[in-house]
Image (cartoon, rainbow, N blue to C red):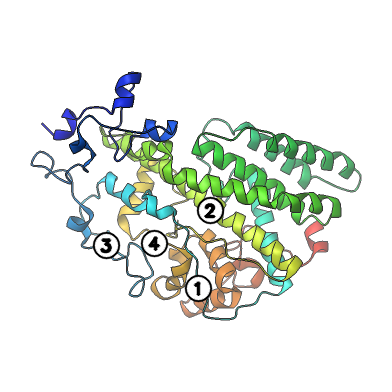
């Protein structure tokens, strides 16, 4: 019998007569409650063995399957630069090692070696792109930072308010502006008055809701709305930092990934949902930092680096319609899990059609449009959609879903 089956629950779970997940150094329930976690035997604090005779035929370590994992970014910008094609089915637990490691939430700051400068036109195009993603969310129910399976069943109430506010905003005209603006202000006030969330999903929903209002109000052109939104920037920064910290320690997040130890299909579903939650947090963080940085650059001509989180750059994973399709895609090729500090390696090691459309946008934000256009052309994907207004919103070799507006008058049209 596996030694894990003989392990005793922690003292807190025994006292509360609760099921203990036996995580180390603290179980998920103790992490959630913020209490000290202690096991009866100090030996239980040792990590469980990576293998045993009973499970050697059905479990593998990452090193056994793909060789050593290289983390030296001087030789490779990819945090997990291995190709999975041809290997046995990668155990689902090891997929969680890639995506759900606490270290994957550490902020990384890119040291720039060039004096890159953005003109106002480029910054406004970045804003217009994110605004179009917001419109896509209203029209389709999902977008590149709000996954279609993130909130199954129903949106959290704060996002329901943000959704209806965004819908009203995109229908706004001079005749109804005096109606829509107060609606948005009231919804924001209600959001700011809500208590601090306890779960990662609620943290994420709160940040996404406030982000929706900030995207609307910071760049609307209405001085009153912009002034109020500017005063909310510290709150957005604080909330997003709390969200990231919650992602790092949240037992909800870890339990989503490790909830299945039985049939393969439920385990795939659990891991897929955990990745959706985690990747949504990562993308929301990146949109938050982009919005704040662009606003500061437009207003003051300078900004500070908030730091970036690791993200999944492989095309096809975000769009996977089922857990089975997602797992299959993860096992076919390198998932390209990396940080913005190493994102320039994508220009050398990948082709544009291998990289997610959201990451095309992030590459443009980090390195500028010219660098991305050069990458596209040098790899033979310059047939269509490589104009400045198409590259932000779509893979450069496909027709863009939305066209960027070059000025405010075109945006209004």
As drawn, the label of residue 283 is 2
| Quarter that holds the C terminus | bottom right
Label 4 sits on residue: 336
| Residue 35, position as x, y percentages in the image | 40, 32
Q: Residue at x 66, y 59 (%)?
A: 292
* Residue 398 in sight from this viewpoint: no
Give residue 289's position: percent from left, percent from top. 60, 58
Question: What's the CA distance linking mark 1 and mark 4?
Answer: 21 Å
Residue 118 point in image, percent of width and height: 66, 74
Disc 2 and disc 3: Cα gap in Å?
A: 25 Å
Residue 103, compared with residue 15, is above or below; it is below
Asked if 166 appears above or below 221 in the picture, the reply is above
Q: Which residue is mark 3?
A: 69
Are dots 2 and 4 in contact, CB under 8 Å?
A: no
Does label 1 or label 4 sit earlier along the sequence? Answer: 1
Front position in the image: 14 or 94: 14
**Secondary structure category for the residue under label 1:** loop
Closer to viewer: mark 4 or mark 3: 3
Residue under label 1, please give it.
Answer: 111
Question: Measuring 33% from the left and 62% from the top, which residue is drawn there?
Answer: 80
Answer few, some or many: residues within 10 Å of disc 1's Cα (few below 14, many 20 plus, some between 14 and 19).
Answer: few
């Amino acid at each position: 019998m596996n030694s894990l089956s003989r392990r005793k629950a922690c003292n807190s779970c025994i006292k509360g007569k609760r099921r203990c997940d036996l995580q180390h150094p603290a179980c998920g329930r103790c992490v959630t409650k913020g209490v000290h976690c202690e096991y009866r035997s100090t030996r239980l604090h040792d990590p469980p063995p990576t293998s045993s005779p009973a499970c050697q035929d059905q479990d593998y370590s990452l090193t056994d399957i793909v060789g050593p994992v290289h983390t030296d970014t001087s030789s490779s910008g990819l945090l997990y630069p291995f190709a999975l094609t041809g290997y046995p089915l990668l155990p689902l637990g090891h997929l969680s090692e890639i995506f759900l490691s606490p270290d994957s939430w550490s902020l990384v700051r890119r040291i720039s070696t060039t004096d890159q400068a953005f003109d106002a036109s480029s910054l406004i195009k970045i804003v217009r792109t994110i605004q179009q993603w917001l419109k896509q969310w209203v029209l389709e129910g999902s977008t590149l930072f709000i996954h279609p399976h993130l909130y199954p069943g129903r949106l959290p109430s704060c996002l329901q308010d943000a959704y209806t506010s965004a819908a009203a905003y995109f229908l706004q005209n001079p005749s109804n502006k005096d109606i829509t603006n107060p609606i948005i202000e009231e919804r924001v006030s209600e959001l700011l008055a809500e208590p601090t969330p306890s779960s990662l999903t609620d943290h994420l929903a709160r940040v996404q809701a406030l982000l929706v209002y900030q995207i609307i109000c910071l760049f609307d052109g209405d001085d009153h709305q912009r002034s109020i939104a500017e005063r909310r920037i510290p709150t957005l920064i604080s909330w997003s930092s709390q969200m990231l910290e919650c992602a790092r320690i949240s037992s909800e997040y870890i339990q989503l990934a490790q909830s299945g130890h039985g049939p393969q299909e439920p385990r795939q579903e659990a891991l897929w949902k955990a990745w959706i939650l985690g990747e949504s947090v990562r993308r929301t963080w990146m949109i938050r930092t982009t919005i704040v940085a662009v606003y500061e650059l437009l207003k003051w001509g300078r900004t500070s680096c908030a730091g970036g989180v690791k993200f999944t750059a492989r095309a096809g994973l975000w769009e996977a319609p089922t857990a089975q399709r997602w797992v299959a895609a993860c096992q076919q090729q390198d998932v390209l899990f990396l940080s913005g500090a190493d994102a320039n390696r994508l220009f050398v090691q990948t082709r544009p059609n291998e990289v997610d459309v959201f990451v095309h946008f992030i590459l443009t934000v980090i390195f500028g449009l010219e660098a991305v256009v050069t990458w596209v052309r040098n790899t033979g994907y310059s047939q269509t959609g490589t104009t400045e207004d198409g590259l932000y919103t779509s893979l450069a070799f496909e027709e863009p879903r939305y066209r960027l507006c070059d000025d405010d008058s075109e945006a209004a049209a």
